[in-house]
Amino acid sequence: MNFQEYLYNQGFQREDLLARMAESLELDDSRSYRMESAYNAIYDVLKADAVFFSKVDFVVYPQGSKAIGTTTKPFGKDEFDLDIVVHIRDLYHNYTSSEIYNHLIRVFRGNDVYRPKLIPKNRCARINYSGDFHLDILPGCIVIRDEDKLMVPDRELASWTSTFPKGYSSWFLDIAKDVRQPILLRKAFENFVTLSEAKAEQEDLPDEDFYSKEPLKRAVQLTKRYRDIFFDKNPKHRTSSIVLTTIFGQLYQGEASIYETIDNILNRIIGNYSEYQQLFEKRGIYKRIKVLNPVNSEEDFTDKWDKDKEYYNQFIAFAKSYKEKWERLKKGDFGIAEELFGSARTKNILKAQLENLSKGKGDTLEKAGLSIIAGKNYVDPKGNITTDNGYQSKPHRNYGG
């Protein structure tokens, strides 16, 4: 019995599918290497500046999805953006906001390599490696000595604005690792390894790290991918990654599987925010949710929703669409995974699952073909595959024969 067969027999094939889907969204090694090289060069370029940066104490570090382990490959024509903080260990009131911003722009504008790649933005300098990725470089100064909360320049406001990237990363990572039970797939992997050792079986086991990533991180990766698909035709009002990540972090309650994490959080989103939507639809009262930085209440991640209500309306539409498709997946419609996470990726992963099953013993592949492809299996409320209880799945497309 191989590991894929063991997962199937335990009813965990759906969870394995979700984990494989999320893993497939990770950045490939080649792009990661190019991006890391570009990131490492930023500190050296700034440190060589004789006018300002060589005279101040600063450190450079990533923020956002790279820092918290929720990166996803770009969708369609999108580029991956790596958010970088230039953390200056000096009090912000020693400078004007435009002074810090202008020094950053000056350094890159004066460099032959970076000048053609430079795009000045409201709060940051963007270095665009066209068609591949871009770096958004955000400068900031500390508020209090020996603390990491920052003030960063905002050109539209012509002033400083508050942020706390290190605090946010710590907040999310602490929540993600606070799983109330052993992570389902990690526990299954450990049980299988023990079983294999007891039987003295020799086989190539999957990478243990693949099954160790916390369910919350995987759930955010998958949700961001459906967000990309949903807003493909309306990119202007796309819900930002920081908003989705924060909502998922706030509503997570330690679920041990990716399936339960997404299922429960979608229910909580619809339940928590339906009152606001009903007020708007029935009485025309616009009372939107506010998604604040959980470690810095001065930072409203949804402040632009006040200026344009369509951001909020489209977020609600996205949440309802996600919920509707997820309910179909719950009831055994594996084909809906194409619409949720992408057609080619879903087909390839299901095909790989069946190929791995075929390496097992006995009639496992035949059982899998009957239950998964022909729709003769059942799915219990936790998303596990059973033979006799729960929702009966629907027949779906021929993934790989």
Image (cartoon, helix red, strand yellow):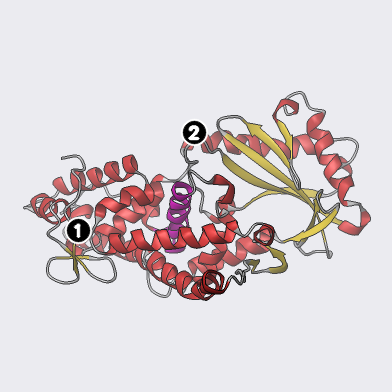
- Residue at the image position 89 percent from the left and 46 percent from the top: 99
Based on the picture, tell me whether residue 222 belongs to the magenta stretch. Answer: yes
**What residue span does the magenta drawing correspond to?**
212-230
What's the distance in space between the residues labelled 1 and 2, CA to CA? Answer: 33 Å
Relative to 94, is 140 on the left or the right?
A: left
Q: In what element is the residue under mark 2?
A: helix
Disc 2 designates what residue? 30
Camera-nearest residue between 388 and 55: 388
Q: Which SS type dominates the magenta stretch?
A: helix
The quarter of the image holding the C terminus is: top left
- Marker disc for residue 8: 1
User: Is 313 contained in the magenta span?
Assistant: no
Mark 1 crowd level (few <14, some 14–19, many ≥20, 10 Å Cα): many
- Name which residue type carries label 1: Tyr
x 19%, y 62%: residue = 198
Amino acid tagged 2: Ser
- Residue farthest toward the front in the current orientation of the protein: 283
- The residue shown at (22%, 53%) is 4
Residue under the image location 83 percent in, 65 percent down: 144
Determine the image quadrant of residue 119.
top right
